[in-house]
Image: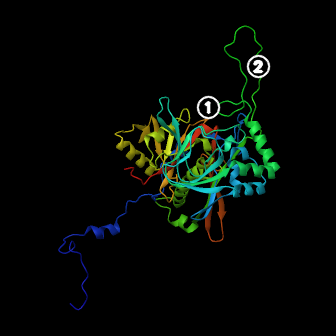
Amino acid sequence: MTGEATAQSPDDQGRLSLGTRAAQQLATTAKTVPQMQGVTPRWLLRKLPWVDVPGGTYRVNRRLTLTAGRGRVEFVQTGADDVRIIPGTLTELPLLRGFADPAPLAALAGRFAPRDFRPGDTIAAAGSPVAEVLIVAHGRIEQLGTGEYGDAQSLGVFVGGTHLGDGALHRPDPVWPHTYRAATAGTLLALPWPDLQRLLDEAPELRAHIAARAAAAGRPANRKGEAEIALASGHHGEPVLPGTFVDYEPAPREYQLGAVQTVLRVHSRVHDLYSEPMDQVREQLRLAVEEVRETQEWELLNNREFGLLHNADYDQRISTRTGPPTPDDMDDLLTRRRGTRMFLAHPRAIAAFMRQCSRRGLYPGSLQEDGHALHAWRGVPIFPCDKLPISEANTTSIVAMRLGEDAQGVIGLYRADLPDEYEPGLNVRFMGIDEHALIKYLVSAYASVAVLVPDAVGVLENVDVAATGE
C-alpha cells in the first residue's frame, strides 16, 4: 500500500459491525444541568426565623442596661518584646466606654508595661490586694476558685485582649476574688495603681468620665445588669408598696439590610441559538443565585456590622480550656443561655469534637433535620457550616443560638414582596441589552441578622481543629 493506513484501536480490529464509538457520533447525548461545587446546605439561612422588614430598618428596643459590656483590647506588635496597646481600643474597658478624647487614651496606653509569664505562674492570688490593671496580650490564663471542701475549681479562661482588675478602681481596699494562673506562656501588660492615679490627676476630663461611669454602675440593677424594677413580695398587711417604672435604652440598635448584588450578562446569540434543550439564561441565573445565597450566609456570620461572630456580646464569648473542643467546653457554651436551638460549627470543628468524645468513651446522639442525620449534643443539633473561618493557626469558633422573636433570640431580616422577586428576599431585574448584544440582569439579595438580647448567641473561641489532644 502506498497510502498511510488508518489507525485502529485493538477493539476495532476484526469488527464485523459498526462500533459504539462511531455510533455515538449520530446519537443524542444525555447531559446534566451545569453542576457547582460551591453549593452547601446553608443551614443558617434555612433555620433562621425570617422577619419581614418593610422599611428596610429593624430597631431592637431593650431595657436600660447599667452595666457596660466588657470588650477586648487590641495590640500592635513591632518586635518580639515590643507589644503596645492600640489606644482607641481602651474604650472596651467598662469604665472607659464612650470616652472620645484620644490624648488621654494614648497617655494611658503608654503607661502599660509588658510582663512575660510562664506556664504555672500565679498572676494574682485570691484575697491579695488589687494593685494594678492587667491586660492579656497573648497566652492563656486560667481562673481558679475554691470549692466547698477546699478543692480547686476551674472557673474559666482568659485569652488575648481580656482584662483583669479594672473594675476595682472605685472600690475601697479591693482584693482579687479568685486566683489567676498561667496555663501557657504569654505576655501581660500591667498598669500599677499609682501610675493610673497620676494620669487621672493630669487628665481631669478622664477622671470625671470614670467617676460618672462608676456612679451609673452603682445604681440598683438585676443580675443581667438591667435597671432594677422595684417590687415587694412576701409581705403581709397593708405596707406602702414601692413605685417603679421600666426604663429603656435611649439609643436602641438599628439593623439595616445588607445587600449582595451582581450583574448577570448573557450574550443574545447564546440565548437565541443554544437554549435547547436547556435554557441558557435559566441555568446562568440558577448558578448565580446559588453563589449569591452562599455569599449571603457568609455575610450573616462574618460581616463586621451585623455578622454574628462580630456582634456576639463579649460576655457570651468563652475560650476552650485546652484547645480542642471538649464536651466540657460545649457544656459551658450551652449553659450560658436558655433554650439553645442550634450549634453552628465548621465540619473540621465537628470532627475535632467527635475525636474528643471518642477519647472519653462518649458518643453524642443524632437528630434528623430535613432528611439529614446530624450530630447533637445534649439534644441540640450541631449544624455544619464552612462559612465559619479557620485561622492560619488552625483555630475556629463554634456558635450557639436561641432562635425567634418570641424567645428573644436571633432572627433573620429580609424584605418581602420585592419588585421582580425571584425568591424571598431576592429579585432579578432586567437591565436591557447593550451595544455588545449582551442581555443584562441585576441580581440582588437583601438580608441581615439581629440579636434581640445579648445572651441569644454565644461563641466558643480558639477551637483548635488540628490538635489531636493526645
**Taking 299 as reference, is 244 left or right?**
right
Q: Is residue 127 visible?
A: yes
- For marks 1 and 2, the one nearer the N-term is 2
Question: Residue at point 74% right, 57% down?
Answer: 107
Foreground disc of the pair 1, 2: 2
Would you identify the image quadrant in which residue 265 lies?
A: bottom right
Q: Examine the rendered structure and indicate whether residue 186 appears above or below residue 405.
A: below
Secondary structure type for disc 2 = loop
Q: Position of residue 328 (x, y in %)?
A: 45, 39
Question: Residue at point 42% right, 45% down?
Answer: 353
Would you identify the image quadrant in which residue 451 lies?
A: top right
Name, please, the residue furthest toward the top.
237
Dot 1 alpha-carbon crowd within 10 angstroms: few under 14, some 14 to 19, many 20 or more: few
**Taking 102 as reference, is 362 left or right?**
left
Image mark for residue 242: 2
Q: Position of residue 343 (x, y in %)?
A: 50, 42
Image mark for residue 62: none
State the residue in front, 378 or 445: 378
Residue tagged 1: 406
Q: Is residue 249 visible?
A: no
Q: Examine the rendered structure and indicate whether residue 308 appears above or below residue 10.
A: above
- Mark 1 is on which residue type? Asp
Dot 2 alpha-carbon crowd within 10 angstroms: few under 14, some 14 to 19, many 20 or more: few
